[in-house]
Image (spheres, rainbow, N blue to C red):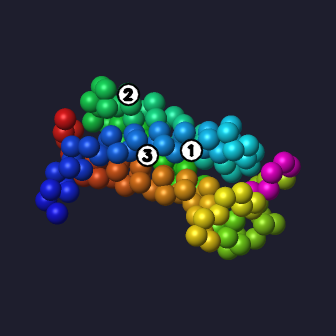
Amino acid sequence: MAALIAFLRKYVLYIALVQALVATLGSLYFSEIAGIVPCVLCWYQRICMYPLVVILAVGILKKDKLVAHYVLPLSIIGFLIATYHFLLQMGVVPESVAPCVAGVSCASRFVQWFGFVTIPFLSMVAFAVITGCMVFFLKQKKYVK
């Protein structure tokens, strides 16, 4: 356990950066290569995710001890939107309250692996990982190279 904590202390910002980069590239793959048109909620999640790549990269390069304060608002808002979107797709939230009034329905499931892994689920996990990394970083109270 101590080895894991030491590893996380050293690389937690890099883990968050890689997660944000993979999520960004994944969303671009789904829309630009797979041809899946993003719905309104997908766009809101992208608005929260895409800047995280730049914010985390600059925070790492500048060794900014406050980087988590810039990341957390976007990651928490993105997590909440992704969670709502996932619950909408799973039928927990009725489709009648979906914000998608034109274009692609937010309740549409273009990808569904193992019966529950959808694009909003992947987004929700990505935001959760980034948020968890930032909370861990804040608890460390100092930046470790």
Q: CA distance from mark 3 to mark 2?
A: 15 Å
Identified at 24% across, 50% down, the residue is 8
Q: Is residue 95 visible?
A: yes
Q: CA distance from mark 3 to mark 1?
A: 10 Å
* Highlighted magenta segment, given as a residue range: 102-106
Identified at 60% across, 65% down, the residue is 113
Question: Which residue occupies the foreground of this view, 17 or 138?
Answer: 17
Q: Mark 2 sits on what residue?
A: 58
Badge 3 density bin: few <14, some 14–19, many ≥20, Cα 10 Å: many
Q: Which quadrant of the figure contains the N terminus?
A: bottom left
In the displayed orientation, state which residue is furthest to the right: 102
Pointers 3 and 2 in contact (C-beta within 8 Å) = no
Residue 81: give x, y in percent of width and height.
60, 55
Residue 44: give x, y in percent of width and height.
64, 45
Question: Which residue occupies the foreground of this view, 81 or 124?
Answer: 124
Type of amino acid at the residue the image marks with label 1: Gly
Q: Is residue 69 above or below residue 125?
A: above
Looking at the rendered structure, the secondary structure element under dot 3 is helix
Pointers 3 and 1 in contact (C-beta within 8 Å) = no
Pick whichever of labels 2 and 1 is earlier in the sequence. Answer: 1
Type of amino acid at the residue the image marks with label 2: Val
Identify the disc placed on residue 101. none
Identify the disc placed on residue 26. 1
Q: Is residue 40 visible?
A: no
Looking at the rendered structure, the secondary structure element under dot 1 is helix
Residue 136: give x, y in percent of width and height.
29, 53
Identify the disc placed on residue 19. 3
Pick whichever of labels 3 and 2 is earlier in the sequence. Answer: 3
